[in-house]
């Protein structure tokens, strides 16, 4: 299997659709750990469809599944690094989880 970074957008979209089917199946069978792994794979694959130039350093974003606001300090590949409001430790999130405020 190719790495997500080696796939063209069409391959990524096909892969995401397949992962989403597997995710729904895992959830319906109450396989929580499998569903969590598949959700992460989906988020990573979707991140390769996002142009990093659309993410502004210093801007604030909502993060899917997290409370609070995330301020981007820098990008490294498909990850945005920064801090969540009220925390001092740096964290990284896949680009697909960032939602403009």
Image (cartoon, helix red, strand yellow):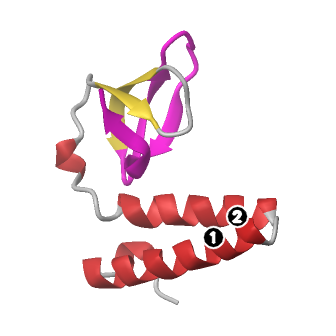
**Alpha carbon of mark 2 to alpha carbon of mark 1: how far?**
5 Å
User: Quick one: which residue is furthest to the top in this view?
Assistant: 86
Q: Nearer the viewer, residue 37 or 57?
A: 37
Relative side of 34 to 101, left or right: right
The answer to whether the residues at label 2 and label 1 have Cβ atoms under 8 Å apart is: yes
Is residue 3 in view? no
Q: For residue 92: magenta?
A: yes
Q: Nearer the viewer, residue 59 or 62?
A: 62
Q: Position of residue 41 (x, y in %)?
A: 56, 66
- At horizontal 82% and vertical 65% (from top left) the residue drawn is 30
Q: Is residue 76 left or right of residue 18?
A: left
> Which of the labelled discs sits on residue 7, or is there none?
none
Which badge, 2 or 1, is on the more N-terminal residue? 1
Residue that extends furthest to the front in the rendered view of this protein: 28
31 or 7, nearer to the observer: 31
In magenta, the rendered stretch is 76-101
- Judging by the rendered image, the residue that carries numbered circle 1 is 23
Instruction: Please tell me which residue is depicted at 55% across the width and 31% down the height of the picture.
Output: 66
- Which element carries disc 2, helix, strand or loop? helix
State the image coordinates of residue 6 (x, y, percent, origin top left). 36, 80
Confirm whether the magenta stretch covers residue 94: yes
Badge 1, how many Cα within 10 Å: few under 14, some, many 20+?
A: many
Query: For mark 2, what is the residue?
Result: 35
Tell me where residue 57 appears, x and y as whole percent. 25, 29
Measured from the top left, where is residue 10 in percent x and y? 28, 83
Looking at the rendered image, the quarter that the C terminus falls into is top left
């Amino acid at each position: 299997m190719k790495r997500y970074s080696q796939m063209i957008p069409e391959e990524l979209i096909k892969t995401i659709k397949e992962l989403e089917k597997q995710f729904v199946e895992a959830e319906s069978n109450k396989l929580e750990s499998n569903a969590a792994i598949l959700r992460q794979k989906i988020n990573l694959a979707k991140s390769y469809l996002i142009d990093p130039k659309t993410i502004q350093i210093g801007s604030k974003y909502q993060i899917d599944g997290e409370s609070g606001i995330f301020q981007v300090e820098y990008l490294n590949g498909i990850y945005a690094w920064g801090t969540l409001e009220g925390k001092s430790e740096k964290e990284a999130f896949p680009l697909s989880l960032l939602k403009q405020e």
